[in-house]
Image (tube, grey):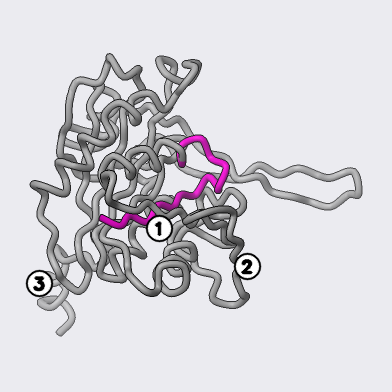
Amino acid sequence: MRILVTNDDGINGEGLKVAEAIAADIAGPDGEVWVVAPAFEQSGVGHCISYTHPTMLAELGPRRFAAEGSPADCVLAGLYEVMKDARPDLVLSGVNRGNNAAENVLYSGTVGGAMEAALQGLPAIALSQFYGPENVSLDNPFEAAAATGTEIVRKLLDAAPWDKADYRVFYNVNFPPVPAAGVKGLQVTTQGYRAETSFGVKPHVSPSGRMFLWVTGGPQHHPTGPGTDVTANLDGYVSVTPLRADLTAHDMIASLKERLE
């Protein structure tokens, strides 16, 4: 198996090493693991692509490249340049430093990388490590992901549906904010919504008198309801959420037709 690995924390991100180890386990001794990751951190860029300017690509070592662009750019670079002679069988994006559950899914560069792979017709999985008081101070805060990641990815490859729809399914995996020994298992979930938190901005005036705005986040540890990703994670479970890039509100179509047509 040939696996392409990317992330949004950058080519030096600690979680990338975990994803590479998972990929090596899945690929096996006869497989190949290729890395195309952002040269610099790209957290929060979502499914952004560098449409209006070129992306520099640098080879750092065997099957290892850094691109001055987003995770989606990295997937494009991997498919159409780095691995153009033989496309990968799987794309892994992560392991992200912090959760990409609930509304974070919409902002996540990690999810954006997996989404681009799915749009390109490839099986793709986004991997993220939830941080919290039980794991943030560990020697390896990615302990839960490192201990269970291979098993989770293998289960998805062996048993999960992988359709060939126009907007094909891809999977969003979040590891709980606990040590490896505290992981209780796996739950299939929907995307939650943290009703009491959102992104905002905080103004700051520089010494030169210019106004700058810093984006601020909200609390991450509010449960999001039964059966959802954040609640599963806070209860100690790995969450697996099937996603599609289709943003149509399908539940509204019939009602809208009645009202407008």
Q: Say which label, 2 or 3, has the lower sequence index.
A: 2
Distance of label 2 from label 3 (alpha carbons): 47 Å
Residue assigned mark 2: 56
Three-letter amino acid code of the residue under disc 2: Met
Locate the C terminus and report the quarter of the image it occupies.
bottom left
In the image, residue 255 above or below residue 206 = below
Pointer 3 residue = 254
Q: Quadrant of residue 251?
A: bottom left
Horizontal side, residue 119 vs residue 51: left or right: left
- Residue at (22%, 45%) from the top-left corner? 241
Q: Residues within 10 Å of mark 3 (few under 14, many from 20)?
A: few
* In this view, the mark in front (3 or 1): 1
Q: Quadrant of residue 135?
A: top left
Range drawn in magenta: 1-16
Where is residue 171? Give x, y as percent.
24, 50
Q: Which mark is residue 113?
A: 1
The secondary structure type at the circle numbered 1 is helix
Query: Foreground: 202 or 165?
Result: 165
For residue 34, above or below residue 122 = above
Depth check, mark 2 against mark 1: the one in front is 2
